[in-house]
Image (cartoon, helix red, strand yellow):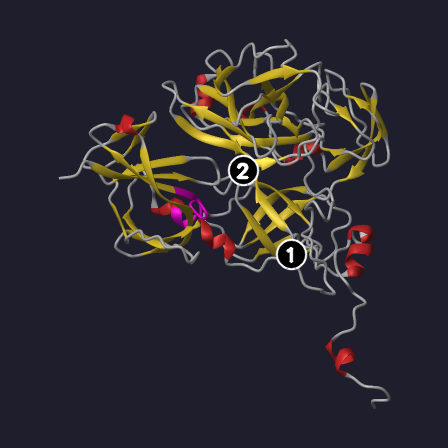
């Protein structure tokens, strides 16, 4: 007789989590309730040393309280992370035996109300080509760290230092009401961990570490002479958010912090997580999870913007873990934790509030505590604190659905004077309202005269007139496009003048 039960923890890309078990009753493990009501079966789990892709198949029945057919068809479970482990249901405090971690693959739906999917293991990431090949086309993706075209730059922060060339978004129109998160000692400027809980290891507030100084204020957090550490802070939202608005899904969360490594260390790792909890401390969603990542001695913003706050959210928890990789001190550092909630019931919290503008810092300085009125005229400059920003046309534009043909074709109203036919073809559209909120899809075709947009794949939910979205142009990765459309030839990552196969196979005086 055994007292082992299998547990599944599923985390969707939108942060929502689901907990299941094959036990005959619900299990409570580490504060989360694993439901026994949703039946599923799986193939056997096997491990070997061959580094082969360790996939297994999962089959389950739709449950209106758990995984629903509508959500599966909408793609909400695509690439969801899954953790499988064993627990002793007679004594869950004994901990868990980890069995598998991976991601959902292709989901197949049957007429009998059953779904089937494969769980792709972590070695799936190894079954791809590592490295690059010479190519006439650019190998960067539009807007990534190599391309550097500011497709969706971060939103400007108050009382924050910016350097010349930094690009930000600024809310300048119909800005909905925002509510700041009352963190205690968010920049560790008290010179201590006041307001924070040191869950493990050691860490302290410092004024410097090698060449690293504070990003904001006078202090920052860095680990001590330990292999790892964890600090956390939980904020009670009862006096911050309106319960009725929370239950209706009316709030969006923007939160983040600055990350770096001190002491000249570039290999120690840090992990920043932001969790939304219910009134008993169970995790409802994890809007931000950077994973373990190494940093340099340059402060880098880690932020999530406009994440949906699920119904039932009553607490917000920030967790920062540091892990030493080399040396004697864990040099993972954190500073300037900040964030706010946006009440979308009082305005439109979408790309429209940026009025299709982005702003380049032309004079370094620190932004004011209160936002000034920005001049949105292209080329016009605005002084914000001691920094100066210049308005530019945004690449990402706000749009509104005017008429619908089907789930893949519709007409829209988009203010973009540069958008000739095909401008958005190959670009990406992200829904900001309606049933498809948060979903992104590639654009197949764009017709300027009619405002007609065709998507490569139909959306999971029906598109509705009035739905809001943001959309950015496509890039065919050709040198001519990089020069003429994006003026970004300095970052072009292709070799357009390398001789082709015909030239390489030819011989002198060939006719």
Residue 487 point in image, percent of width and height: 82, 50
Residue 123 in the magenta stretch? The answer is: no
The residue at 57%/60% (across/down) is 129
The residue at 75%/36% (across/down) is 357
Q: Is residue 510 left or right of residue 66?
A: right
* Quadrant the C terminus occupies: bottom right
Q: Main secondary structure of the magenta part?
A: loop
Farthest residue, direction left: 1
Disc 2 versus disc 1: distance between alpha carbons? 22 Å
The residue at 39%/21% (across/down) is 281
Location of residue 177 (image quadrant):
top right
2 and 1 marks in contact (CB < 8 Å)? no
- Region rendered in magenta: 72-82
Location of residue 415 (image quadrant):
top right
Instruction: Name above or below for residue 304 compared with residue 241.
Output: below
Q: Nearer the viewer, residue 63 or 215?
A: 215
Q: Would you name the residue on which mark 2 appears?
A: 433
> N-terminal of the two: label 2 or label 1?
1
Residue 344 point in image, percent of width and height: 55, 26
Q: Is residue 272 left or right of residue 158?
A: left
- Asked if one can make out residue 197 in the rendered structure from this viewpoint, the answer is yes
| Secondary structure beneath label 2 | loop
The tally of labels here is 2
| Secondary structure beneath label 1 | loop
Q: Would you name the residue on which mark 1 appears?
A: 426
Residue 98 point in image, percent of width and height: 35, 40
Residue 14 point in image, percent of width and height: 48, 38
């Amino acid at each position: 007789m055994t007292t082992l039960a299998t547990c599944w923890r599923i985390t969707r890309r939108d942060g929502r989590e689901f907990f299941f078990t094959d036990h005959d009753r619900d299990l409570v493990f580490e504060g989360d309730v694993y439901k026994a009501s949703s039946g599923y079966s799986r193939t056997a789990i096997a491990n070997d040393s061959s580094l082969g892709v360790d996939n297994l198949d999962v089959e389950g029945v739709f449950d209106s309280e758990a995984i629903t057919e509508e959500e599966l068809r909408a793609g909400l479970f695509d690439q969801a992370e899954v953790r499988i482990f064993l627990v002793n249901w007679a004594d869950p405090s004994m901990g868990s035996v980890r069995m598998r971690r991976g991601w959902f693959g292709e989901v197949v739906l049957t007429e009998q109300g059953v779904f089937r999917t494969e769980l792709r293991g972590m070695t799936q990431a190894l079954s791809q080509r590592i490295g690059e090949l010479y190519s006439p086309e650019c190998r960067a993706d539009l807007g990534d760290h190599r391309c550097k075209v500011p497709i969706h730059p971060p939103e400007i922060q108050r009382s924050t230092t910016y350097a010349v060339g930094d690009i930000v978004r600024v809310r300048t129109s119909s800005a909905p009401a925002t509510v700041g998160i009352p963190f205690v000692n968010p920049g560790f400027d008290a010179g201590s961990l006041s307001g924070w809980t040191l869950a493990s290891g050691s860490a302290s507030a410092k004024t410097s570490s090698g060449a690293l100084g504070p990003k904001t204020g006078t202090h920052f957090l860095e680990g001590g002479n330990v292999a790892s550490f964890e600090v956390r802070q939980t904020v009670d939202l009862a006096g911050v958010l309106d319960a009725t608005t929370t239950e209706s899904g009316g709030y969006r969360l923007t939160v983040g912090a600055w990350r770096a490594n001190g002491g000249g260390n570039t290999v120690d790792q840090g992990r920043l997580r932001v969790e939304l909890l219910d009134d008993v401390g169970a995790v409802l969603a994890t809007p931000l999870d950077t994973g373990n990542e190494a940093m340099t001695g340059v402060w880098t913003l880690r932020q999530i913007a406009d994440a949906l706050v699920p119904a039932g959210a009553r607490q917000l928890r920030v967790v920062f873990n540091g892990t030493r990789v080399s040396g004697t001190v864990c040099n993972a550092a954190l500073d300037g934790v900040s964030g706010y909630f946006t009440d979308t019931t009082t305005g439109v919290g979408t790309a429209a509030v940026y009025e299709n503008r982005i702003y380049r810092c032309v004079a370094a300085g620190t932004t004011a505590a209160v936002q000034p009125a920005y001049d949105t005229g292209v080329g016009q400059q605005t002084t914000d604190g001691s920094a100066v920003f210049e308005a530019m046309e945004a690449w990402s534009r706000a749009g509104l659905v005017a008429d619908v043909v089907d789930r893949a074709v519709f007409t829209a109203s988009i203010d973009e004077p540069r958008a000739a036919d095909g401008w958005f073809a190959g670009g990406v559209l992200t829904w900001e309202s309606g049933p498809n909120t948060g979903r992104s899809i590639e654009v197949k075709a764009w017709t300027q005269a009619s405002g007609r947009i065709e998507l490569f794949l139909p959306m999971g939910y029906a598109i509705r007139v009035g739905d809001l979205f943001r959309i950015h142009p496509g890039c065919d990765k050709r040198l001519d496009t990089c020069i003429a459309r994006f003026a970004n030839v300095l970052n072009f990552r292709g070799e357009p003048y390398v001789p082709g196969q015909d030239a390489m196979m030819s011989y002198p005086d060939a006719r």
